[in-house]
Image (spheres, rainbow, N blue to C red):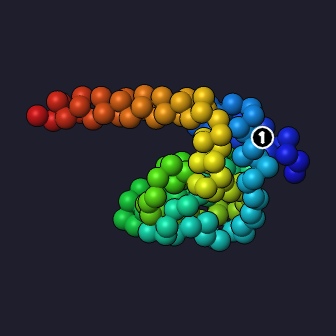
Amino acid sequence: MSIEDDIALLARVPALNLLGMSALQVLAIGAEQRDYGYGDVLFHQNDIADAGYVIRRGSFRVAAEGGPEVVVGVGELIGELALIVDMRRPATATALEHSTVVRVSRTLYQRVLESHPEAARRIRDDLAARTNAAASAIARLTSKLV
C-alpha cells in the first residue's frame, strides 16, 4: 500500500481525521502495517497499551473476560485511549479472519500533536465534548434509577 492509501485509511477514522491532512501525512509515514491470521491475537487484556490500530482489512473480536464482545472491521480504530494515556488493555482483540492493521504508536501520535498544535486543540475539544455527552447520559440514567 502507498502512503496515499494509508492517509486515506486514517482519514476515514473520525478521531484521526480531526488531526488534519498534514498531521495525517506524518502519521501515515511513521505508522507500520502488520498482518494477522485467523485466531491471532492483536493484544491481550491487561497488556500495556502503547498504540492504536486502524483495521485496513479483516475484522477482530474485542472482548473482556466475562464481558460483552464487539466485532470491529475495516476503517475502525482499536485503542484510541492508548494513543493518549498510559494504560493497560481492557480487553483482548483476536483476528476473525486474515486481517491487516496500521499500528500508530503513542510516541508517534504525541509527536504529531506536539508539532501540530491546532490538531491537538481539535482533539482536546472533541474528547471534552464526548466526555460531557457521556457524563450527561450517565446522569440521565442515574436519575431514572433513583
Is residue 65 or residue 25 the one in the foreground?
25
For mark 1, what is the residue? 25
Lateral position of residue 118 relative to residue 87, left or right: right
> Residue at the location (11% across, 34% down)?
146
Is residue 72 or residue 46 the one in the foreground?
46
Q: Position of residue 30 (x, y in %)?
A: 75, 53
Viewer can see residue 91: no
5, above or below 146, in the image = below
Q: How many marks?
A: 1
Q: Position of residue 88 (x, y in %)?
A: 44, 63
Assign a secondary structure to mark 1.
helix
> Residue at the location (75% across, 44% down)?
26
Lateral position of residue 125 relative to residue 67, left or right: right
Q: To which quarter of the image does residue 101 belong?
A: bottom right
> Residue at the location (72% across, 46% down)?
27
Q: To which quarter of the image does residue 18 belong?
A: top right
Q: Residue furthest right?
A: 2
Q: Residue furthest left?
A: 146
Q: Position of residue 133 (x, y in %)?
A: 37, 29
Instruction: Identify residue type, mark 1.
Output: Gln
> Residue at the location (46% across, 58% down)?
86
Residue neighbourhood size for the residue with mark 1, other residues' Cα within 10 Å, grouped as few (<14), some (14–19), many (≥20): many
Viewer can see residue 37: yes
Lateral position of residue 67 relative to residue 103, left or right: left
Q: Position of residue 4 (x, y in %)?
A: 85, 40
Is residue 101 or residue 94 the one in the foreground?
101
145, above or below 66, in the image = above
Is residue 108 or residue 1 the one in the foreground?
108
